[in-house]
Image (tube, rainbow, N blue to C red):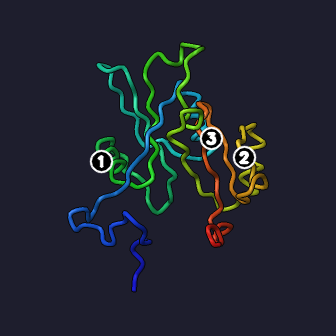
């Protein structure tokens, strides 16, 4: 039998056929200053900017980023790349409301301060120790280092807007959740 889902109260055992082809495309974070955020996400985390969309009438811009593999590169044509971007899984949308970068007191709620809501995004890395060293070299703020706390081998860092990013190495998590 092929795995489709774990079963717990509230879980639909089979995806409705009407949802065939649905893809979890992106999550959005609001950023104060796109230059600072883009530097962090592209230089420190290695995401690639797929598309920038400006909406002058509403005074905001959207930046769509993703971890790209050589096997799945986007098209060169901007229109085709836009459609391709909206068909992918695991895209991060950074939204910049124009002018927020000019206000030194401006800050978005990170979701982890009270009242809590949004928690974090997660980046999977091939080598957690190497990633930790990389973050240290770039003075990235840690919320939790891999050796700290009760849940070992999981790190949390902060982006320039204070959002938490979980950093995991999949092979280290095989026993996670076993009682």
Question: Mark 3 or mark 1, which is nearer the start of the sequence?
Answer: 3
Give the image location of residue 140, x and y in percent.
Answer: 71, 38
Give the image location of residue 63, x and y in percent.
Answer: 44, 36
Quarter holding the N terminus? Answer: bottom left
Distance between the alpha carbons at the discs numbered 2 and 1: 37 Å
Q: Residues within 10 Å of mark 1 (few under 14, many from 20)?
A: few
Question: Mark 3 or mark 2, which is nearer the start of the sequence?
Answer: 3
Q: Is mark 2 on a helix, strand or loop?
A: strand
Give the image location of residue 75, x and y in percent.
Answer: 36, 50
Foreground of the two, 58 or 38: 58
Taking the spot 39% from the left edge, 74% from the top edge, the residue there is: 4
Q: Is mark 3 on a helix, strand or loop?
A: helix
Tag nearer the camera, 2 or 3: 2
The quarter of the picture where residue 161 lies is top right
Q: Residue 60 carries which label?
A: none
Give the image location of residue 133, x and y in percent.
Answer: 78, 49
Specify the farthest residue to the left. Answer: 18
Specify the farthest residue to the front. Answer: 9
Q: Residue 144 carries which label?
A: 2
Q: What element carries label 1?
A: helix
Pointers 2 and 1 in contact (C-beta within 8 Å)? no
Q: Name the residue under label 1.
A: 83
Quarter holding the C terminus? Answer: bottom right
Q: Name the residue under label 3.
A: 43
Distance between the alpha carbons at the discs numbered 1 and 3: 25 Å
| Looking at the image, residue 91 lies above or below residue 110 | below
Distance between the alpha carbons at the discs numbered 2 and 3: 21 Å
Tag nearer the camera, 2 or 1: 2
| Looking at the image, residue 1 lies above or below residue 48 | below
């Amino acid at each position: 039998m092929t795995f489709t889902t774990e079963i717990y109260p509230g879980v639909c055992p089979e995806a409705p056929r009407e949802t065939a082809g649905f893809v979890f495309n992106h999550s959005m974070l609001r950023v104060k200053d796109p230059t600072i955020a883009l530097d962090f996400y592209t230089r420190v985390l290695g995401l690639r900017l797929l598309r920038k969309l400006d909406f002058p009438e509403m005074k905001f811009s959207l930046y769509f980023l993703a971890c790209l593999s050589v096997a799945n590169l986007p098209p060169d044509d901007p229109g085709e790349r836009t459609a391709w971007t909206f068909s992918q899984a695991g895209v991060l949308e950074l939204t910049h409301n124009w002018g927020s970068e000019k206000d030194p007191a401006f800050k978005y709620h990170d979701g982890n301060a009270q009242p809590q809501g949004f928690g974090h995004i997660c980046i999977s890395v091939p080598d957690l120790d190497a990633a930790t060293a990389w973050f240290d070299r770039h003075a990235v703020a840690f919320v939790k280092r891999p050796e700290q706390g009760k849940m070992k081998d999981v790190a949390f860092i902060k982006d320039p807007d204070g959002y938490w990013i979980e950093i995991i190495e999949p092979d280290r998590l095989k026993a996670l959740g076993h009682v």
